[in-house]
Image (cartoon, helix red, strand yellow):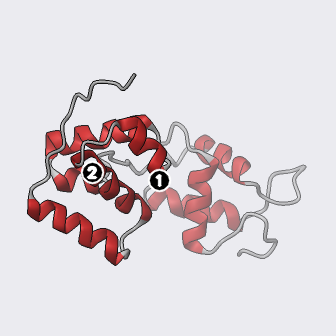
Amino acid sequence: MPRKREYEVKLSPSERDHLTNLISAGTENARKLTRARILLKADEDWPDEMISRALDVGIATVGRIRRKYAEGGLDKALNRQPSSRQYERKIDGKTEAHLVALVCGEPPEGYAKWTLRLLADRLVKLEQVKIESVSHETVRQVLKKTTLSPGKTSNG
């Protein structure tokens, strides 16, 4: 038994033409083209289950695209919304300089070379640097920018 649709999709003739042209051109990414196909089928009153099977997407995806169209229009339904997450930098220029100095120096006793996790631990322990924690991935990204490698024996 088909579910009752919460959100109706009624495309205007110009929206329908835009979606048809978008699909026929085929120059957009696959996700956007699939969303356009979902909207066209939904406008033709296809049940969500049939759209799901025809386009090989989940029923929840069809419902989500319907909802986005009903709440925000065609642009919101077609395009991926940019992330609103704000990334805070943990390592500033001064800390980067201390990290580079660590890499250029000798590794601790008992180690042949620096590892990313070892550098991260040592950076947190430095008195000159006020940082509570740092991941080895952050260390890797900083070293990638400077073209230094903890595995090299001749960084300095």
The nearer-to-camera label among 2 and 1 is 2
Q: Look at 71% across and 47% down and name the residue there.
A: 117
> From where the camera sits, is residue 81 visible?
no
Looking at the rendered structure, which numbered label has been put on residue 33? none
Instruction: Name the amino acid type tagged 2.
Output: Leu
Q: Is residue 59 left or right of residue 155?
A: left
- Judging depth in this view, the residue of 8 and 64 nearest the camera is 8
> From where the camera sits, is residue 124 visible?
yes
Q: Look at 43% across and 63% down and name the residue there.
A: 30
Q: Residues within 10 Å of mark 2 (few under 14, many from 20)?
A: many
Instruction: Name the amino acid type tagged 1.
Output: Ile
Q: Quadrant of the C terminus?
A: bottom right
Q: Is residue 114 left or right of residue 136?
A: right
Looking at the rendered structure, which numbered label has been put on residue 91? 1
Q: What x and y, as percent, mark residue 155?
A: 72, 74
Assign a secondary structure to mark 2.
helix
- Judging depth in this view, the residue of 123 and 5 nearest the camera is 5
Looking at the rendered structure, which numbered label has been put on residue 39? 2
Assign a secondary structure to mark 1.
loop
Height in image: 60 above or below 90? above
Q: Look at 67% across and 46% down and name the residue there.
A: 122
Q: What x and y, as percent, mark residue 121?
A: 67, 43
> How far apart are labels 2 and 1 at the CA level?
45 Å
Q: Look at 56% across and 53% down and name the residue there.
A: 138
Q: Which residue in the rendered view is the most extreme toward the top?
A: 1
Q: Quadrant of residue 92?
A: bottom left
Q: Residues within 10 Å of mark 1 (few under 14, many from 20)?
A: some
Q: Are marks 2 and 1 in contact (CB under 8 Å)?
A: no
Which numbered disc, 2 or 1, marks the residue that appears first in the sequence?
2
Height in image: 13 above or below 55? below
